[in-house]
Image (spheres, helix red, strand yellow):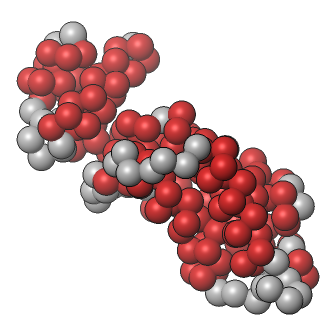
Amino acid sequence: MADRRHEILRAALACFGERGYARTTIEEIRERSGASVGSIYHHFGGKEQIADALYTEALRDYQSGFLELLREDAERAIKGIVRYHLRWVDANPDLARFLLTDRRPTEVRELNRAAFDALECWRAAHQDELQPLSFDAFYAVVIGPAQEAARHRLAGRTQSPTRRMERELADAAWRAVKGGTP
């Protein structure tokens, strides 16, 4: 059962990547996955629910690794978050593209809230090591550059090796948020 569900999600991701969410049909997903229409509707109910499940699972996978880094000290966590973001995108380009470009209304508020709450708790525990930034500014400074680099990589507009980008962006993020003199 779980294998069929996974095959449907994998087929949907490929179809969404090739044709976009709006132009992809259930029939295309069915054909690519080898599932019956009944199986698709049994597991998901329709195209919107397939996209929601795909988005939620991709986000859950991404956030699980992200949250692990909050066990580190401030500098290692900040640099690790940047590196993790770029590595996850490189390892999961289709899922990353879906998350970054095919955002749609979905039931992920609780998932995001838990991740943001964990990050805020971590930040509070390390407040003596960090600049007194609002959460929004902190998140944008740490993730924003890596997010933009990921978008460019997924669009084929980067020439810098990933490891170089990891090092440069991780160091820049740490310099931007560390306490004391910037």
Q: Is residue 8 left or right of residue 100?
A: left
Placement of the N terminus among the 4 image quadrants: top left
Which residue lies at the image location 66% right of the left edge and 44% below the top edge?
163
Residue name at image x 20 percent, y 17 percent: 32
What residue lies at 72% left-to-right and 78% top-to-bottom? 176
Residue 139 figure quarter: bottom right
- Residue 27, image x and y in percent? 9, 24
Q: Quadrant of residue 97?
A: top left
Residue furthest out toward the top: 34
Residue drawn at x 69%, y 87% as measured from the top left: 133
Query: Looking at the picture, does residue 52 appear above or below residue 101?
Result: above
- Total number of numbered labels? 0
Residue 117 shows in the view: no
Left or right position of 41 against 139: left
Q: Where residue 81 sits: x, y (%)?
A: 69, 56
Viewer-side residue, 165 vs 121: 165
**Image vertical order of residue 164 relative to residue 105, above or below:** above
69 or 165: nearer the eye?
Answer: 165
Image: 151 above or below 74: above
**x, y percentage for residue 75?**
84, 64
Q: Is residue 58 visible?
A: yes
Horizontal side of 109 relative to 101 (left or right) equals right
